[in-house]
Amino acid sequence: MIQPALPAIIENAPASERERFLASATLVRLPGGQIAIGMSSRPAMMVFPTAGEVRVYLIGTEGREITLYRVGPGSSCVLSASCILGSSSFPAVAQVESDLVAWVVPADVFRAWVDSSVFWRDFVFRLLGERLGAVLARLEESTFGRVDARLARRLISLGTEIHATHQELANDIGTAREVVSRILDRWKVEGWIDSKRGSLTILDAAAISRISI
């Protein structure tokens, strides 16, 4: 029987912490599209993905979404850690974006580990340091950055062949679908992209890169 992959942090952990993790953690699988943590709920588990991805996003008063960050193999959800340690409600939504395989640890167990272990306290501080800067940068970009530049950067990050709807791209950069559609229509006329329902191809990467600056 093949041993399931372990999270990177556990692969590199001291033997005692590895044993403690294996004694308490459970392997789970969640399909794409499932809500992993709902708005205002209390996280019941700390999740350590080994495959797949979770999108963490906010929903505005008018129903618009903005992606805060994604959690995949080698990372964990900083908001989950914060809520577990602070006994507070989740201020966003965490949704499985692509089929997820993850180890999960009960919230009370994870809290006890952080209370008693330097290893786990260091993990939480590193997680905070990595994610906080990224989240603040995303919020600053969404508030002050040009929408076309944000969209260009998102397209570049996805590669040449992109499978995403206008709504999904709008959610990622924190704007309305109609705005994304207008920009993409203009770029299509310019010959920079070719698009069809649910996907698009970058034809002039240099032009898109110039817009992203």
Image (tube, rainbow, N blue to C red):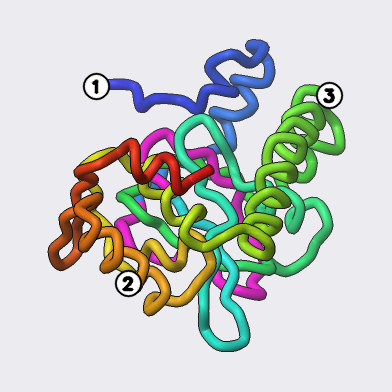
| Residue behind mark 2 | 181
Residue 197 picture location, percent across and down: 15, 67
40 inside magenta stretch: yes
Circle 1: is it few (<14), some (14-19), or many (20+) Cα within 10 Å? few
Residue ranking furthest to the bottom = 62
| Residue behind mark 3 | 118
The answer for how far apart the CA atoms under marks 2 and 3 are is: 49 Å
Residue under the image location 60 percent in, 79 percent down: 60
Label 1 vs 3, first from the N-terminus: 1
Q: Of discs 1 and 3, which sits in the foreground?
A: 3
The numbered mark at residue 106 is: none
In the image, residue 12 sits, relative to residue 157, either above or below, namely: above
Q: Amino acid at mark 1?
A: Met
Q: Secondary structure at mark 2?
A: helix
Q: Amino acid at mark 3?
A: Val
Residue 32 picture location, percent across and down: 31, 58
Circle 3: is it few (<14), some (14-19), or many (20+) Cα within 10 Å? few
Label 2 vs 1, first from the N-terminus: 1
| Residue behind mark 1 | 1
Q: Of discs 2 and 3, which sits in the foreground?
A: 2
Residue under the image location 59 percent in, 56 percent down: 68
- Nearest the viewer among 73 and 46 is 73
- Nearest the viewer among 68 and 195 is 195
Q: Which residues are magenta?
A: 30-53
Q: Is residue 132 visible?
A: yes
